[in-house]
Amino acid sequence: MLHESELRVLEILWNKGDTAAKDLAASLKQSVGWHKSTSYTVIQKCIGKGLIGRLEGDFICYANLEKAEAQKKEASLLADKMFNGSADLLIASLLGSNKLTNAQVNQLRNMVQEFSEEA
């Protein structure tokens, strides 16, 4: 499970690509107000967990985890934790009382068809 702080670091790397740690810390200061020491602590934790890597010398950081893979893992964890692993209950909960446009309904139908066992 990704912590919010780890996700903040990864989001920057997913959006900007490989980034020097000092620039990553500057982006985190601007976006969430973290001090440099806090940013470096979180970066080190992400490196320790294998979420990001770094190139020695210039201390360039890069994401070791693709955004789509992180989304898939987090959604699966949420389904397991809150809905006994039921993807359909998770989706129903996400939709809730939100009204969808016809285009969104069609897009969801296409996705369901693509991922169904009979596809």
Image (spheres, helix red, strand yellow):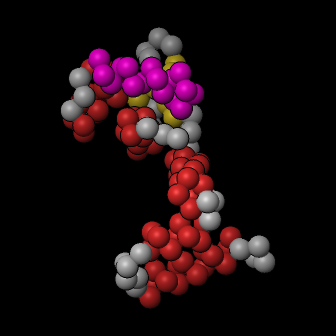
Q: In the rendered view, does 94 fall on the left or right side of 22?
A: right
Q: Magenta residues?
A: 37-53
Q: Position of residue 46 (x, y in %)?
A: 48, 27
Q: Residue furthest bottom?
A: 102
Q: Residue at x 46, y 80 (%)?
A: 104
Tally the marks: 0
Q: Position of residue 80 (x, y in %)?
A: 60, 55
Residue 76 location (% of width, % of height) = 59, 54
Is 39 above or below relative to 100? Answer: above
Report which quarter residue 87 is drawn in.
Answer: bottom right
Would you say residue 16 is visible in this rendering? Answer: no
Predominant secondary structure, magenta span: helix
Residue at 45% from the left image edge and 20% from the top image edge:
44
Name the residue: 55% across, 26% down. Answer: 49
Residue 72 rendering spot, x and y as whole percentages: 58, 53
Q: Nearer the viewer, residue 104 or 41?
A: 41
Q: Is residue 55 magenta?
A: no
Q: Quadrant of the C terminus?
A: bottom right
Comparing 73 with 87, the one in front is 87
Q: 99 left or right of 57?
A: left
Query: In this orientation, does residue 62 appear?
Result: yes
